[in-house]
Amino acid sequence: MNITEIQDLIKFVAKSGVNEVQIEHKEFKITIKSDISVKRGRAAAAKALELEVQQMQATMPIIPMAGAPQITAPVAVQAEEPEQDSHLIEIKSPMIGTFYRRPSPDKDSFMEVGQQVNIGDTVCVIEAMKLFNEIESEVSGKIVKILVDDNSPVEYDQPLFLVEPA
């Protein structure tokens, strides 16, 4: 079981509202517990579990299993891009969910490459637990690049847009 499969499992547990899941396999045993109270809601549970995933990624060694492809971290690719575009500002996802560029399938996109964006402008919608959350820009400038495909899953703090500040 690799990191991606573990993340997917944690997301599933967060969305389903289950308090505990335990999986045993020949080489490993995983227990995922959620002690989030019902009062805080599923969105809070998903966010808390996402933070646990990020902590796991930082501390968990990658152990290759026999016959499994080697997993390489894309750290080098991510490290190169900010150097090239160091003057650009990222608009990041404030939550996990599904990224949508338009308010509905029959409407135009909120933002296009080259379009001017101001503070408070809606740049996209992220669906989390059947709730559609409008994401507003915290910067003014020009959209240089859209980093996520429409109708794609996004992670907490994942860059969505690159903006050249005004």
Image (cartoon, rainbow, N blue to C red):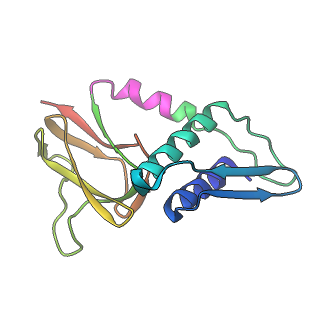
> Residue shown at 59%/53% (left/top)?
10
In the figure, residue 73 lies in which quadrant?
A: top right
**Residue 13: percent from left, percent from top:** 57, 59
Position of 70 with respect to 75 (left or right) is right
> Residue shown at 79%/41% (left/top)?
63
As drawn, 74 above or below 82: below
As drawn, 130 above or below 11: below
Position of 163 with respect to 67 (left or right) is left
Q: How many marks?
A: 0
Position of 60 with respect to 113 (left or right) is right
State which region is magenta: 78-87
162 drawn magenta = no
SS majority, magenta: helix
In the figure, residue 124 lies in which quadrant?
A: bottom left
> Residue shown at 16%/39% (left/top)?
142
Position of 64 with respect to 10 (left or right) is right
Check the picture and name the quadrant holding the C terminus.
top left
**Residue 148: percent from left, percent from top:** 37, 52
- In front here: 128 or 42? 42
80 drawn magenta = yes
> Residue shown at 27%/30% (left/top)?
88
- In front here: 81 or 135? 135
In the figure, residue 106 lies in which quadrant?
A: bottom left
